[in-house]
Amino acid sequence: MLNYDNKIILAPMVRIGTLPTRILALRYGADIVYTEELIDWKFLRSKRRINDILKTVDFVDQTDGTIVFRTCHEEKDKVVLQLGTCDADRALKVAKLVENDVAGIDINMGCPKEFSIKGGMGVALLQNPEKAFKILETLVNNLTIPVTCKIRILDTPEDTLSLVQKLVSSGIKAIAIHGRTKDERPQHPVHPGTIKYIAERIPIPVIANGGSKEIEKFSDILKFKEMTGCSSVMIARAAEWNCSIFRKDGMLPMDTVIEDLLRLSVDFDNPPANTKYCIQNILRELQETPRGRQFLDSQTLEQMCTIWNLQDYCKEKQKMYQGLGIQGRWQVTPSDLEPPNKKSKLANEVNLDGVIQMQVCFIRSNYNDLNLPKSQLHAWAGKNGFSLPIYQTRQVEKLFQTILIFNDKKYTSTFWEKNKKFAEQSAALVCLYHLGLKTKDDLIKLGSLL
Ligand SMILES: Cc1cc2nc3c(=O)[nH]c(=O)nc-3n(C[C@H](O)[C@H](O)[C@H](O)COP(=O)(O)O)c2cc1C
């Protein structure tokens, strides 16, 4: 059972707290890592799948095949999944889905963003202690793993304490306190005194948070711990900027951290856009340098790796994964959609008799702007005096399939894509293959063959 006493923790951070960053934080010395906030109703659209190739557990959104949450054995006993929720039953349903894959569940009661507040989540729960209590109590009573919550302080230490006491009575194992009110922004000073006031008066570990502005090295974490009288500390921005803040032996240069993050991103086949975002937040103002600008132009992991001389590592690993059959995302069809919906009947109404079908997907990161399947097909059609193809796309929920009509023949991919553009490109790939303009080997190299 996860113990929250005397721990240094990676705080939840949207888009930053994905698997590569979490593993990096653990390897640098963090004791516990929180996921980014995951919204309960979005999570409920996912299904658990074991990924034998990456050795991960993936929760895959059944409406578009994207991965909502990826985790692995290395973090199993140290990862806490943070949920955004306003509903006890829904929160429990999600927690039950992940109960055997994570070490703890945390409820976000500190997010001041409009999206959270309007949905009754985040700091909205601080104004509704009964509901907050009900969510925590439901989880505590029905889960085998510990439950925590992360709050902001209220206007006075006394008000904060009475709220915390109510939450603690639900049976949670620890509480993270961000020492700012809901109206204070990161640049405002944190209130360590209020955190201390609470920590001295409640029986469970308080995890102090909000000190990053003054945290520039590991010993500053210990200072913040001391100042707040807490048993544990949670770090967000200082880790976002340089994750080696968790190293007791001293911080590493920025480039080393980026290289370590890139290797993990390749290892876990992390979406390039997410890796790019994380590195942008490490580079910060250095994005304005020539190398920074080169980085901003990159789209694929290989392009990013090249800037830090890791292109061979990336190529070899990606080649190995592709050889083992990894496709970057999971196949989802309208018949998988849960719950079954009326619209999915439409999918069966289209007659695919006479349509040349093949299961290929379109992986955008494997192309540049000039060699896209549609461009290749259109160029070939022009050169050989054919009319350009016609694209007919249908949509079921958030999935798309295109029938491409070319030279009196129809082509489609049975892989449902997440947008219209991708569906057209995968239909074009089927057509190119049947015209002999792409070989099976080409499709394998492009990660398209399923
Ligand atoms: C990029 C970013 C994303 C964040 N996302 C979350 C989140 O998903 N859940 C949450 O409870 N807090 C989130 N926070 C707030 C942090 O967890 C933390 O409370 C805040 O940054 C103060 O801690 P610090 O001084 O160590 O940065 C986020 C902060 C940042 C900078």
Image (cartoon, helix red, strand yellow):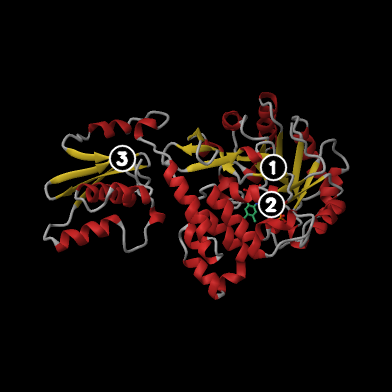
Q: Is mark 3 within 8 Å of ligand 1?
A: no
Residue situated furthest bottom in the rendering: 290
* Residue 188 location, quadrant: bottom right
Foreground residue among 445 and 255 = 445
Q: Which mark's residue is nearer the viewer, 1 or 3?
A: 3
Q: Which mark's residue is nearer the viewer, 2 or 3?
A: 3
| Residue 166 position in % (x across, y down) | 77, 34
| Residue 99 position in % (x across, y down) | 62, 30
User: Who comes first in sequence, dot 1 or dot 2?
Assistant: 1
| Residue 250 position in % (x across, y down) | 77, 60
Foreground residue among 93 and 100 = 100
Residue occupied by mark 1: 126
Assign the N terminus to one quadrant of the image: top right
154 relative to 136, above or below: below
Q: Residue at x 69, y 49 (%)?
A: 27
Contact flag, marks 1 and 3 (Cβ < 8 Å):
no
Residue occupied by mark 3: 359
Decide if residue 274 is on the left or right side of residue 398. right
User: Who comes first in sequence, dot 2 or dot 3?
Assistant: 2
Residue occupied by mark 2: 182
- Pointer 1 local density, CA inside 10 Å: few below 14, some 14–19, many at least 20: many
* Residue 37 location, quadrant: top right
Alpha carbon distance from label 2 to label 3: 50 Å
Q: Residue at x 51, y 64 (%)?
A: 306
